[in-house]
Amino acid sequence: MSPTQVVVIVVVVLVLAALAAFAVVASRRRALRQRFGPEYDRVVQERDSRSAAERELRDRERRHAELELTPLSPESRTKYAAAWEELQVRFVDSPAETVGDADELVSRLIAERGYPTGDFSDQIAHLSVEHARTLTHYRDAHEIRLRNERGEASTEELRQALVHYRALFADLLGTDPVGHQPPEQHHPDHEHDVTSR
């Protein structure tokens, strides 16, 4: 075999190895994107590089695999759905307090499913593996709850917080807890204004 043929063979082997490596990386990236959805893009934006973000997401998958997650019993599912419905009814009379109660109820559900409930960012990381599509709702609800604690959240923001909590709650519950949206605040000046509905 001539030296030229050896060089050509080596180059072909190197090109094939590079293509195979690229295919593996692309396949892993596609799998992470499918699993994490919008959370994938969020982590990529927050990190220095795409590879650092993907390392973090794979680390989340590894830590998630170590959890002992448990499905809810039908009794627990019914209990949580009833508790959520009660929250929505109470919202009309005490929206600020209800948002805090919604956060506590969601945290209890997270704990019962087997997720850690300590640090909020750890919660997000663990939940992102199976519930990534509802994490934006959870983050928004959490932010509104913090503003509520400082007395800075409007009633409409509190209603939105309840809607956001409900998205994660339903995802964790495996079903919509009730068949209607959180109640609107009663505005007497809009009673006859059909266009505002």
Image (spheres, rainbow, N blue to C red):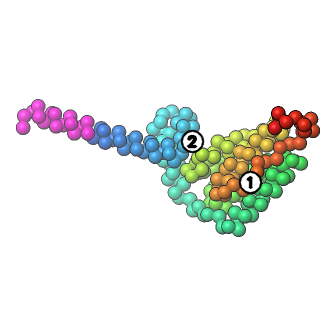
Quarter the N terminus occupies: top left
Q: Nearer the viewer, mark 2 or mark 1?
A: 1
Kindly identify the amino acid type of the residue bearing the numbered disc 2. Glu
Secondary structure category for the residue under label 1:
loop
Q: Is residue 9 magenta?
A: yes
Separation (CA) of disc 2 from disc 1: 28 Å
Callout 1: few (<14), some (14-19), or many (20+) C-alpha neighbours within 10 Å? Answer: few
Q: Are the residues flagged by discs 2 and 1 in contact, CB closer than 8 Å?
A: no
Kindly identify the amino acid type of the residue bearing the numbered disc 1. Gly
Which x, y percent locates residue 164? 71, 45
Residue holding disc 1: 179
Secondary structure category for the residue under label 2:
helix
Could you tell me if residue 51 is visible in this image?
yes
Residue at horizontal 82 percent and vertical 33 percent from the top: 195
Relative placement, left or right, of 152 versus 112 is right
Residue holding disc 2: 39
Relative placement, left or right, of 64 versus 156 is left
Could you tell me if residue 150 is visible in this image?
no
Q: Is residue 20 magenta?
A: no
Residue 111 falls in image quadrant: bottom right
Residue 140 falls in image quadrant: top right
**Residue range (magenta):** 1-16
Which x, y percent locates residue 172? 65, 55
Residue at horizontal 30 percent and vertical 38 percent from the top: 18
